[in-house]
Amino acid sequence: MKRKAMAMMICLAMVLMMGNAFAQQAPVAGTSIGVTSEELVTVAKGWSANKQIMGKDVYNDTNEKVGVVSDLIIAPDKAVSYAIVGAGGFLGMGKNDVAIRINQFKIVDGKIILPGATKEVIKAMPAFQYAK
């Protein structure tokens, strides 16, 4: 299970790093948009942020729930990515959304772990707000 979790994190990191390279390539005249049949096989075997990360609980290394992943942000230069984690609140009231670098998370036994985190630490972080 640990190998699978590590493989998922490596795949995410590779996809995020490769996004920058693909974004810089100009389309070649006469090529189609989308992926090839060979690429589609790779995509189908890949990792889904929507199914495996979004809306999932975040725990600290003592197995306490400290928040929920509400979004993934890819920086404009695509070099660094962040998870938006919401902590506290009830029914959306009083919740503090914060940005945390993807490389600070670990996946252990299918759980998203943020080592050293507590609800208090996350609530004390600067709040994340989307650009207008």
Image (spheres, rainbow, N blue to C red):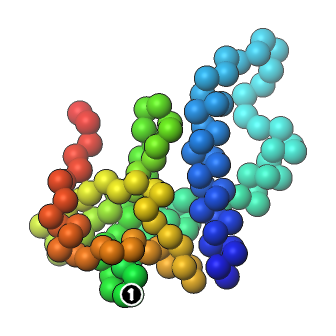
Nearer the observer, 10 or 49: 10
**Residue furthest left in the image:** 94
Q: Picture coordinates of residue 99 (x, y %)?
A: 31, 54
In this view, the residue farthest toward the right is 38
Residue at the spot x=39%, y=71% of the render? 114
Q: Position of residue 54 (x, y in %)?
A: 46, 63
Above or below, 90 relative to 69: below
Residue that extends furthest to the front in the rendered view of this protein: 116
Q: Residues within 10 Å of mark 1 (few under 14, many from 20)?
A: few
* Callout count: 1
Which residue type carries mark 1? Answer: Asn
Q: Nearer the viewer, residue 114 or 90?
A: 114
Looking at the picture, tell me which residue is in the foreground, 72 or 55. 72
Q: Which residue lies under the disc numbered 1? A: 63
Q: Along the horizontal axis of the image, is 57 left or right of 132? A: right
Q: Residue at left 50%, top 38%?
A: 79
* Vertical position of residue 6 compared to residue 31: above or below: below
Q: SS class of the residue under badge 1?
A: loop
Q: Quadrant of the N terminus?
A: bottom right
On the picture, is 118 further left or further right than 113?
left
Residue 48 percent coordinates (x, y): 61, 60
Residue drawn at x 71%, y 58% as measured from the top left: 46
Residue 68 falls in image quadrant:
bottom left
Regarding residue 88, the answer to whether it shows in the image is: no
The front one of 113 and 35 is 113
For the C terminus, the quadrant is: top left
In the rendered structure, the answer to whether residue 99 lies left or right of residue 36 reads left
Residue 78 visible to an observer of this rendering: yes
